[in-house]
Amino acid sequence: MPFDSLFAQEHESRVKREDVYITSKLWNTNHGPGDVMKAMETTLKDLKLSYVDLYLMHWPVALYRRPWKAKHPQTKCNFSTVDWECDDEWRFDVSLESTWAQMEALVYSGRTRSIGVSNFNVNSLKRLMKIARIKPVVNQIELHPYLIQSELMDFCRENNIQIVAYCPIGSPGNAALAGDHLRQSTLIHNPIINRIASIHKKSPAQIILRWALQQDIVVIPKSTNLEHIQQNIDVYNFYLDAEDMSQINSLQKAHIRYVPTSHTLFGRRISEETFWNSDALQIPSDI
């Protein structure tokens, strides 16, 4: 159902626009001059809205935009409405600063109430904070007991940037599609998590979500299963004690990412370690 129909006064749901918090993101191929506003206009048109509540820069890198058919002449795109494919080659003619200025313009024009970032490391955030007239209110990152990212969390808290965790329960779906090392390390099957779950008479996913919430982390678990969705909401009627939290924190030793990165710089594949530890849009030191 389109949002304009949902919010219509005559609709039986009586849902008001101000009662729904809507977030969207800017993709990497839309960082260039004028592209941010165009991308937002497309989003608002598709959603049939006059504004969104939060708009995020999806990644701190700008990528080239290539025609799908030019690169894959014999392959049909999985998304019938997509004419362009995200190329994985970084572009350096578009700066992080110029893209953020365009993000700020969206706030001034009323097209979004707030702006933030996603997948930014400490170096990227420091660079952004130097020039920002409007500072990011959110940093949405992969965060779970296997990937706690303490330094990044500390920096965000010190600068009043809300942490939003995607893959908060370890992305069981991604793990099932990945290699053996991820299939065998799914968080919801971890014995420590399951032991704590049995003590509290909760599901492993509920334990993991509660662990994050007790650290003032916003979680955005993803599920198409109604029972799981209901369980993900039912996490406010119990509390993990210091021992529970300590045991869960010990799982950080695994340091597993469920969302991979795939980028190329000057024809050379960049390792995940280099990507996550380099300054945004700057040439990594080992290139």
Image: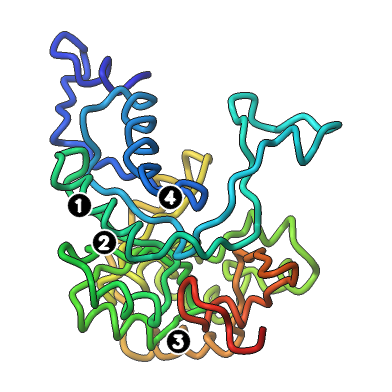
In the rendered image, the quadrant that contains the C terminus is bottom right
Q: Report the amino acid beneath label 2.
A: Tyr
Q: Residue at position x 64%, y 24% from top?
A: 80
Provide the residue designation for mark 1. Answer: 114
Q: Earlier in the sequence, mark 2 or mark 3?
A: 2
Q: Residue at position x 82%, y 32% from top?
A: 73
Q: Earlier in the sequence, mark 3 or mark 4?
A: 4
- Work out how far the residue at label 2 is from the one at label 3, CA to CA, in angstroms: 20 Å
Badge 2 density bin: few <14, some 14–19, many ≥20, Cα 10 Å: few
Indicate the secondary structure of the residue bearing disc 2.
Answer: loop
Q: Which of marks 2 and 4 is in front?
A: 4
Provide the residue designation for mark 3. Answer: 249
Task: Provide residue 215's location: percent of width, then percent of height.
Answer: 28, 77
Is 40 in front, or is 205? 40
Q: Residue 32 — which label?
A: 4
Q: Report the amino acid beneath label 4.
A: Gly
Q: Earlier in the sequence, mark 2 or mark 1?
A: 1
